[in-house]
Image (cartoon, rainbow, N blue to C red):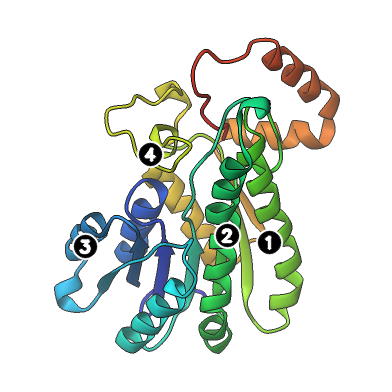
Amino acid sequence: MRGLEGRVALVTGASSGIGAALARELSARGASVVLLARRAERIAALAEALGAAQGRAMAIPTDVTRDGELERAVAAALERFGRLDLVVANAGFGVAGPFARLTLDDYRRQLETNVFGVLRTAWATLPALRASRGTLVLMGSVAGHVSAPFASAYSMSKYAVRALAEALRGELWTEGVATVLVSPGFVESDIRRVDNQGRLREGAKDAIPSFLRLPAEAAARRIVEAAIRRKREVVITVHGKLLVLLSRLAPGLLALVGLRMARQPPRHRERPPP
């Protein structure tokens, strides 16, 4: 996939944050975009802004945790555009908190969205990507390289996504489909305003200082460039790259940091790490 003119991109979790920014960036580069998310009104408004009336965007309300919804959405996208060249499995959220206070339902809820939602997206879009020899982008996280106290569920889900990306990279390459893993650090998004039930708290403040948060638009530009170049992995943010490097070169140092964090349990619900 050398360029985006005449190409069709599908993005899950497109109602806010990185997903919405990706939709805008892809559209600005000439792609037609298919927006998937649960919040129908948000993706409808975004699709309208990106040229739905001119046939350059469409919104399909979709829940990645429900069997059959991705297949329905892909069928509708193919009926409208005839092809898919780029798929971004971006939908996800973060469950956080001390292990002893979490339940099996918390872990199931986390994995259902962040892992099985990715699997549903990949399976539903694979035939179209094979036909176009396109690109599958999986949204991982720095937390898929570095697991921290109070983020076991979220990190488990992102380690699983990284493992899937590494396995699919070889499998799908023989069929002409590239697999790109995206590992963001702290990016402007709603993820830290979403509770363990997956509900957005509109008035909640982001616990991460603004100087550490990369604007979603900047992250989207880097992700799209990585997709066009069919890169193996792109780690977003300087601190994210540093943490990934330390996980490889100085795991003992990160373990000590984790012990220090564990001695200071949160007074309130912890937010997931990058």
Disc 2 + disc 4, Cβ < 8 Å: no
Indicate the amino acid at tag 2. Answer: Leu
Structural distance between the alpha carbons of marks 2 and 3: 24 Å
Quadrant of the image occupied by residue 179: bottom right
Residue designated by label 4: 190
Q: Which residue is mark 2?
A: 138
Q: Is residue 21 visible?
A: yes
Answer with mark 2 or mark 1, whichever residue precedes in sequence: 2
User: Which numbered disc flags the more N-terminal residue, 2 or 4?
Assistant: 2
Q: Is residue 52 above or below residue 6?
A: above
Q: How far separated are the C-alphas under marks 3 and 4?
A: 18 Å
Of mark 2 and mark 3, the one earlier in the sequence is: 3
Instruction: Using residue 166 as the reference point, say whether residue 270 is left or right of it.
Output: left
| Comparing labels 2 and 4, the label whose residue is closer to the camera | 4
Amino acid at pointer 3 = Ala
Q: Amino acid at mark 1?
A: Ala
Q: Residue at x 76, y 16 (%)?
A: 259
| Residue 100 picture quarter | top right
Left or right, 25 with reference to 41 = right
Q: Position of residue 33 (x, y in %)?
A: 33, 70
Inter-mark Cα distance, 1 to 3: 30 Å
Q: Mark number for residue 44?
A: 3
Label 4: element kind: loop
Q: Which residue is mark 1?
A: 165
Compare marks 1 and 4 and give the one earlier in the sequence: 1
At label 4, which amino acid type do we have? Asp
Q: Are marks 2 and 1 in contact (CB under 8 Å)?
A: yes
At mark 3, the secondary structure is helix
Instruction: Check if mark 1's residue and mark 4's residue have beta carbons within 8 Å.
Output: no
Relative vertical location of residue 228 with respect to residue 262 in this rendering, above or below: below
Residue 12 % position (x, y): 42, 61
121, 210: nearer the viewer: 121
